[in-house]
Structure formats: C-alpha cells, structure tokens
Amino acid sequence: MSDLLQLLEGILGHIPDGLTALKDMISEDFGAGGSIAAIILVVTIAVLIIQSLINIIFKLIRIVILPSVALSFFASFFLSISFSVALPASVSLFVIVLLIKN
C-alpha cells in the first residue's frame, strides 16, 4: 500500500502547485482511500477523453478522408479535373455529410 502511495505521489508530484494543494487536502481529509479514489477518477476521465478523440479520428478517416480521396481520384480520372482542385470540394462535401450523419 505504501509503495502504491509512493508511486502515486511520484506521478502527482509533477502537477502544478494548485493541484498539489488539492492532492494534499484530499490526502489529509480522506486518507489513502480518498487519494486512490481521486486517482481512479482522474484516470477514468482521461480514458474517456482519449476514447472520444480516437472515435472522432476514426470517423474523420472513415467518413471524410477516404471517400474524399476516392471521389477526387475518380473526378480527376474520368472528368479530367485536377486532383488538387477536386480534393477541397470533395472534403467540404464529406464534412457536411459527417455533420449531418452525427
């Protein structure tokens, strides 16, 4: 238990002074259990934020980037429009599709 608290103290030792004061207050008021609960809360919130960012990135790749490149390629191949002209227009189109889809 003390090793865990030392590890948590090492991790939390790198945060600014305001958060250090909050950590000390939680340790004094709630003890080791409160510190562990606060760490679990912070890690859970961080995981949820990272998960949301990954979800947004995958949606952008799947719904915007890949179809835009494919549409621009087909437009440049079949309609003899420059790829660099067709790409911004197709990205704009698929961004609107993404906004409507969500």
Image (cartoon, helix red, strand yellow):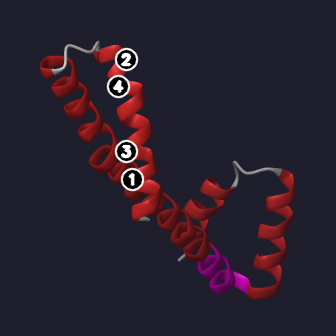
In the shown orientation, is residue 53 left or right of residue 58? right
Q: Residue at 49%, 68% (x, y): give it.
A: 48
Secondary structure of the residue carrying tag 3 is: helix
In the rendering, which numbered label is found on residue 87? Answer: 4
Going from N to C along the chain, the mark reached first, 1 or 4, is 4
CA gap, disc 3 to disc 2? 15 Å
Task: Give the extent of the magenta segment.
Answer: 31-38
CA gap, disc 2 to disc 4? 6 Å
In the shown orientation, is residue 85 left or right of residue 67? right
Secondary structure of the residue carrying tag 4 is: helix
Image position, residue 59 (x, y; %):
35, 53
- Among the 4 quarters of the image, the one containing residue 89: top left
CA gap, disc 4 to disc 3? 11 Å
Residue topped by disc 1: 97
Question: Which of 84 and 63 lies nearest the eye of the viewer?
Answer: 84
Q: How many marks?
A: 4
